[in-house]
Image: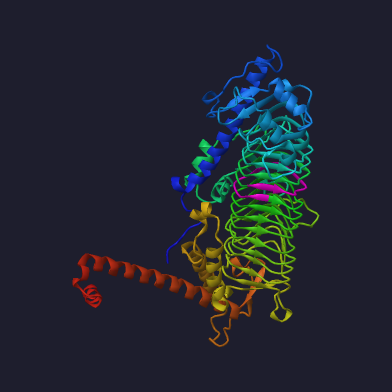
Amino acid sequence: MTDASPSSTATSSNLAPFRESKSRRDEQHQRANNLISAVTSKLNANSNSSSVNSPTSTIGNDIGISACSVRPLTRREVSTLEGPGCSCKCEDWSKVLVITTDGVGSGTDLSAELRGQICTTTFAGWVLLGVNIGNSTSSDDSCGSPLKPGVRRNDLVSNCILEPGCTVQGNTFIDRTHVCPDASIINCGSVTFASDSSFADEMEITIGAESGGGRDVRVHVESTLVDVCHKLGMGSQSTSSSHFHYNHYKPTKLIMNTICRNASILHSPMVTCVYLSPHSSIDAATSVSNVILLPESKIAKSCTVDAAYLQWKATITTNSSVSSTVLMECSEIGPNSFVSSTVLGPDSHLSAGECHHSLLGPNTNSHHQSLLISVLWPLGRGNVGYGANVGSNHTGRLPDQEVCAGEGTFWGLGSVVKMPVNLCDAPFTVVAAGVELSPQRVGLPFSLVLSGTEQDGGGGLNQILPGWVLQSSPYTIARSEAKFANRRKAKRHAWYTGWCIIRPSTIDMCWHAREELVKAGNSSLSSQPSGQNSLERARPTIYKSESIHRLGQNYITENGRRKGILAYTNVIQLYALRGLLLKVEKALKMCHKSFGDEVAPRELERRMEG
């Protein structure tokens, strides 16, 4: 069985989609800067001449936009916009410039096109107004067809770039917004950009302990889990992806809202400081601010979002409240979720619960009403059951602790996990329904944690069955392997999220756990008086952390210890035998390739044995 480690080394091809995304955003930012520079230049030229009769000129490649004409309105065009067909208003029409993308508009009267594309809008400040040449549909028809490109029925538009082919209709207030061709802002309240905003494609998130020791990490729109874990000091520092983010990533401070091609903001009362990549959308959100959406991501249905990055196909939906959060590719929050200061890994889902100050790895799912506080779960792949309180911190102390969850941990219905807890060395452990897990560290992989019984004499501790998943529920592992493969939709993160469950690192954990279980049994016999015969020297009924350190604050019965040894022995041996089989098969293929079809497989085996 091959090993796919979660710390797989990134190559240039792995990181190419992330770099390309950053490059496209920087190009779009530069495009907006160039257009603003063109507007400023024109307005300065206008200030030295008459308001609307200044000479027209063509601005092309000198601002980085091919065949682009930017010029002031003519008097006839102003009369058209103010006339009964358009009914537009502006205190100073000299600050409204026209942009066309085919180079025709420099000396062409655009009155017919303006009449067909612009109506019932008040302009203020400077506005760069896009016009599609040749589209001269009557204003009555255009105003009655909200899906057609144009600027219609807006109470106030100021300091905006509205490129040809965009749709801006039925809005209350649009300010400092760049709307690209084929992009839309329809039926919104205010879409604005704060002049003193520090909005950028980088932010700082505090995860782990909520106070007195939280882990501050700077994240970018294109961050991967590998990058985040390295910045937190988890795992090897050799992965080349760190060079991309640490040494070459230059944060870009955005200067205005940007709505790229085929992106849209619809039916949202308040939107501030946003960047929408192509094919992303904000639809019927309550409030959105300081948000960057990569392609095909969306925010919808009465959500409140502040300071969030959504990667490709990420979603926030239905009455959710999200702040200071990164949603990696194909992840989802909602419905009815409350999430803050969280890094949500690819293909992960949070719904109907709360999650704060946490790092959740790939394929992590919480589909029910539950609570996650200060949970560090970098390898993810686990589930949170209904009513689980993971990171309960209602002890009267400062919230200065955290929960370190192991890969594939299942938090059962109504379980209560009190910080600090560390299950990193107990991957794919099941915490059963109703278990109250006290502060502890557990190092027994694939285990089942149950509430203790009085007849066992555990003294109020929980009972743990080491290796239970391996021995009693191996189907869980097989099903999980298939499930992770089928649900792994985040293609850009696939280079580090497809590792096997049974791999060298988990086998090492099983080996160490088995050794400690064997040692505990031997120690219990050797500590008894030597004069007793073998029948009298019986092993103890239960073991606690004094005998087995990896137990944490739990106990194990003698029967459970023996079954754990058997489970770990079986998986170690099967893994070794599978590895041997693969090596033999590989050797046979190499021999067959060397000898060709001249020697039969059985003859090859005979020669190898000889």
- The residue located at (33%, 70%) in the rendering is 585
Viewer-proximal residue, 546 or 49? 49
Relative to 570, residue 591 above or below: above
Viewer-proximal residue, 79 or 51? 79
| Residue 526 visible within the image | no
| Outermost residue to the top | 48
- Residue 247 shown left or right of residue 440 in the figure: left
Viewer-proximal residue, 560 or 415? 415
Q: Position of residue 147 (x, y in %)?
A: 69, 45
Q: Is residue 86 magenta?
A: no
Q: Position of residue 293 (x, y in %)?
A: 64, 45
What segment carries the magenta color? 280-298
Q: Position of residue 506 (x, y in %)?
A: 51, 64
| Outermost residue to the left | 598
Q: Is residue 292 magenta?
A: yes
* Image quarter in which the N terminus is found: bottom left
Q: Position of residue 232 (x, y in %)?
A: 59, 47
- Residue 500 shown left or right of residue 595 in the figure: right
